[in-house]
Amino acid sequence: MMDKQEYAQKVQKTIMNVKNIVVIYPNGVVANKGVSLDIHKGEILGILGENGAGKTTLMKVISGRLRPSSGEIYIEGKKVQFRSARDALKYGIAMVPQHPQLFGGLSVLEDLGLSLKLAGMNISRERLRSKIEEIEEKYGINIDLEAKIWRLSMGERQKVDLVRTILLGKKIIILDEPTTHLTPMESEKLINIMKKLSKEGRAVLFITHKLKEALMASDRIAVMRKGKIVGIVKKEEASEELLIKLMFGDKIDSEISYVKAQKRERDKVLEVINLWVKGPHGVWSLKGIDLHVFHNEIVGIAGIAGNGQRELFETLLGLRKASKGRIIIKGVDVTKKAPLYRRLLGLAVIPEERLGWALVPGKSIFYNIALGLVFDDKSFFIDWKRYKTLARKVVKMFDVKLGSVDDPVDSLSGGNMQKVIVARELLRSVDLVLAMNPTAGLDFKATLAVRRTLASLRSRGSSVLLISEDLDELTELSNRIYVMSRGVIKGPFERPFNLKEIAKAMTT
Amino acid sequence: MNRAQRNSLLSLISGILGLILIAYMTPAGLRGTFSTLGLVYSRIDLLETSLLYSGPIIASAIGLALAYRAGFITIGSEGQVLLGALTALWLTAYSGLHISRSLMLPLALLFSGLAGALLGLISGILRAYWDVNETLSSLMLNYIVLAFANYLIAGPWRTGPFTQTRSVPNLYAINKIDVLITVLFLAFIYEFLLRRTKLGLAIEALGKAPKAAYTYAIPVSSIIVYVSLLQGLTAGMGGALMIMSFQRNMTAMNQSPGYGYMGILVAWMALISPVGSLIAGYFFSTLIVAGYLLQSKGVPFNTVLLLQSVIVLTFIAYMASRRTKG
Amino acid sequence: MVNVMSILTNGLSNATPLILAALGEMLVERSGKVNLGVEGMMAVGAAAGSLAGVKWNSLAGSFLVGGLSGALLSLIYVVAVIGLNADQIVTGLILVFMGIGLSELIGIKTGGTPGTPLFPSLGPFDYLEVFSIVLAVFLWFLLYKTWTGVELRAIGEDELSALERGLRVKTLRVISIIVGGFLAGVAGTYLSDSFHYGRWYSGITGGMGWIAIGDVILGYWHPFGILISGYFTGLLFAMKPLLPTIGIPAELADALPYFLVLVALIIVTFIYKRLGISPPASVWKTIR
C-alpha cells in the first residue's frame, strides 16, 4: 500500500509517463505492443533488450520522431502530443540517435545551432559558441566547432549529438546505443557524463543491448522483449543472470561447428597487398592494407564502424577503385577487374544493405534469384522457367516464408530477405564469401541461421571474409581476426582470442 | 474514400479541367477544338494520316522507354530524329544512289538509325565514363544538330530560290503500312530485349537499384553505352520515317520539329514500355493531326504539345497518387 | 570590325536571365529537389510578361506577371512532386513542354501589336543586371549567414535526417520551388523585354533554361559561382556574331555556345570528381 505522502512524492518525482504505446509500421510490423513506463527525475534508466526488441521505436515515440498508432504521453502529469521532434525539443526532451543524423555539408556549429533554432531559441553564432564551449569544459568533451561534419568520424559525430542533447535536453536525455561507435574507454567516460547529467536532475534514458554497460550505468533497468517491457529491475536487485533471462526468455542452443583452416602458402584464396583507397571527399580511407585468407577459414575484420570497413568491402568487390596495391583472388590479380569478373572467379557477396543493394526492390523474388545467377551463364537469353524452379527450390531449402515466388521481394521480412541473398550465392560455385554485417537487424533465429550457413560453408571448403561490428559474432565464427582502425589493418589475432587485445587494437 | 482514392480522383478532375481551360483559351474556342478532335476520330483518312505521323514519335518512344528503365534520362531523341532525317534525306536525294524502293527503306532505316545511335553514344559515353549529366549533354547536342541542319539547308543542300532542300523522290516515299510494320517490329524487338535477355535484366536492375547492378551485372558503364546506342538507334530511324513519309524536304527551322520531344511524353505515357508506346504514340499522333487542322483556325501548333503534356502529367499524377499511403 | 565593348555589354545582358533562372534553380536543388522545367517556366514568363507589358504598357507589370506565371507553373510541380509524390525528373520534363505550349497560346495574343518598340532597350547596365548581382549576394547571405539558410542546406543534404529531426522540409522546399519558378519567369520576361523590345516570338527561350540548369552545376551550387558561370555562358552567346567574321557560317555559329557549355560541363564534372568535392548530397544522387 502506498500512503498519500509517498504517492505525492512519486508524482513529483515523475517527469514523464508513457501509457500503452502501440506502434505499427506501415509494413505491418508491430514494434511496440502496449508499452507503459514511468520516467523519474534524476535517474539513469537503462532500456535493455536485444536487436529488434522495440527499444529504438519506443525512444522515437518519446522524442517525437515517430507518432504512435495509439497510446498516451504525459509530461509532469499533463497530457502531450508530439507532432515532430521539434515539439519534444520544446519540452526539453532530446535524443542522441544510434546512428548520428547530422548534415554533412554543415559545420558543427551550424548543425547545433539548427537544433536550437528548432527548439525556438534564436541566438547568435557567438553566443552559441560560448555556450557550447562552456558545456565542453564542464563535461570534458572536445570537438572542433568549425569542422565540417563530413570530416568527422562516427564517434566524433556522436559527441556532437551529445553536446546537442545537453544543450536542449533540459528534462530528458535519451541515448540510443551511444557506445556503438565508441571505444571502451570512451564508453566509460560517457557513462560518467551520464551520471553527471542525472545528478543535475535530468532523467537519462540509456538504451543498450550490452548487459555490462546497463548494469554499470543505470539506477533502474527496463528490459524489453518482442515489443513489450518484460520487467523493470532496480540496480540493487539486478544481476546478469536475471537480465539475460528477461531478455531472451528460454535459452537457445547456439553451438557452431569449428573447422581448422588449411594454412599453406599456395592455399591462399584471397591476398591483399598494400591496398590504398580514397573514400568520399577524396580522403584516404584505406592506407596500405595487407591481409590474406586461406582455404577453409573464416577471417573476421573487426572495428568500430566508419574506420574503412565499408571501403574495404567495396574495393574487394570491385565497386571502388584502388589507387595503389593489389588484390589477388585464387592467384589471379583482379585489382583492375570488374565485379562480375571477380564473381566468375568464385567470389560471393552478402552486402550490408539488403534492399537496394543485394536485392532489387519492386521486382519478383525469382527475378532477384536470377540477378545473382544469370551472369554466370554464357547465353544472352534468359530461361525464366529455370530460375522460377530454382527460386522454388531455394524457398523450400531455406524455409523462406512467402506467398509465391512471383511476389515482389519487398514483401519479405529482413530475415527472409537475407535467406534469399545467402541462398542465391550458395547455388553458385563459391570459393570466397565476402560478407558485411550479415546479421545486422535480424532477430535471434535468423541471426543463428545465417551464422550456421557461414560455418557450413567453411566445412564445405569455402572461405569467408566476415566484416562485422559485432565482436561476439566474430569471435564465435572466425579462425583469425584482423582489426581495422583509421584505415589501417592490425593483427591477425589467432584463437583463442584475447578480447582485451582486440579491443585495444580497435581503439588506437 | 481514402486518401489515395481522393487524390487520384482529384488529379483526374484537375487534368480534365486543365484540358477544357486550354481548349477554351485557343482561338478556335472550346467547341472548335473538341469538334476538330472528334473529326479526326470520325474520319478514316485522318486516322490513317495519324499513322504516318506516329512513326517518328513511336520510334523515339520505344528507345527512350529502354533508356528511362535504365535511369538514363536522355532527351536527345529530338536531335537524333533530326539527324536521322538528314541522313535519310541525303541517302535518297543527294547520294545519287539508285536502288529499288523495297531496298531503300531498310537501307535508310539502317543509316539513319546508325546516325542516331552515334549521337546517343556521345551522351552515353560521357555519362558512363565521365559521369556527365546525360539530360544536359543530350539537350546541348539537340541544339548543335539543329544548327547543323540549318547550315545544310541554307548552305550546301540549298535548292531553288527559297532556303529549302531537295525532296525525297516519290519513288522512295513510304506509306502507312511501311510505318506500321517498322514500329511494330521495333516495339516487339525492344520488348523482347527487355524481358528475355541478360541486358534487359541488367537494365531493370540499374534503373531500380544501381548498386545491385554494379555488384551483380555486367559492368554498368557498358550497360549505359548499350542503352544509349539502342536509344539513339530507334530515334534515328524515326527520322527516316519522318522525312520519307510526311515531311519529304526541309526548310530553315527556328525550332526543332518536336517529334523527338513528343516521344519523351509518349514514353512516360506508356509507363516506359516499348509495346505500350505503340498505343500511346498513336493516340498522341491523332492529336498532332488535330493540331494541324486547328492551325487553319489560328491555333499555334505547339498547343498540341501543351495538350499532350497535360494528359501525360495527369496520368503520371494519377498513377502516383494511387500509390499514396493512408 | 566587331566592337569588343559591345560584346561585353551583350554578354552581360545575355548573362542576366541565365543568372536569375540559375539562382532560382540553385535554391530548388539546395532544398534537395531538381526541377528540370526551367525552360518551360522561362517560356511562359516570356510570353505572359510580354502580354502584360503590351496590355498595361508597364515594365514593372510586365516583370511581375512574367514572374507570377513562372511561379504558377512551378506550383504544378509542387502539387505533383511534393503533394502526390510523382517522379521529379518526369514532372520537370513535362513542365518544359507544357510551358513551351502554353507560351504559344499566350504569345499569339501579343501578335498584331505595332512593330514600334514598346520598351526602350534597357542599356548596358540595366536594373535587372544590378538586381541579379544583388540577389546573388542576398542568397549567399541567406544560405550561409542565417539559420533558415542553414536549415535549407540541411534539408538538401539529407532528407530523412531532416524529417526525423523535425526540420521544415516541405515548407522550405515548396517556398524554394515557387521562388525558383518566379525567378525563371522573370528571366523569361527579360528575354522579351530586354532583347526584343517587349515582343515575344515563338521559340524565344532557345534552350536558355537548360543552359541555366547547366550554370547551376558549373557554378557549383553557389550564388557567386553562378554569377561567374552565368557571365561565362552569357559571353559565349554574345560571341556568336564574331564567328562569321572569321569565315564560319552564321548557322553553324548558333551551335557554338551549346557546344562550349557542353565542353565546360565535361570539364567541371571531371574536376569535381577528381577533387572528390560533392555538391548538396541528395542532389548528387539525381544530378551528376
Image: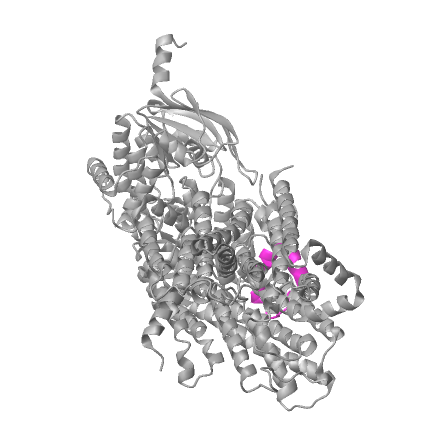
Q: Nearer the viewer, residue C194 or A446?
A: C194
Q: Position of residue C35 (x, y in %)?
A: 48, 56
**Quick one: B241 or C288, which is closer to the camera?**
B241
**Residue at 41% across, 39% down:** C166
Residue situated in front as seen by the camera: B164 or A383: B164
Instruction: Kindly report the secondary structure that dominates the magenta region of the rendered protein.
Output: helix
Q: Estimate the x, y position of residue C32 in percent, counting from the top left.
A: 43, 52
Picture coordinates of residue C84 (x, y %)? 56, 46
Q: Position of residue B106 (x, y in %)?
A: 68, 80
Query: Residue A60 versus residue B257: which sits nearer the camera?
Result: B257
Is C212 a magenta residue? no
Range of residues picked out in magenta: A366-389
**Residue at position x 46%, y 47% in the image:** C174
Evaluate whether residue A149 shows in this view. no
Q: Residue at x 33, y 42 (%)?
A: A114
Task: Assign the C terminus of chain B to one quadrant of the image.
Answer: top right
In the displayed structure, C25 sits above or below A122; it is below
Which quarter of the rendering shows the N terminus of chain B? top right
Q: Is residue A387 found inside the magenta-colored segment of the image?
A: yes
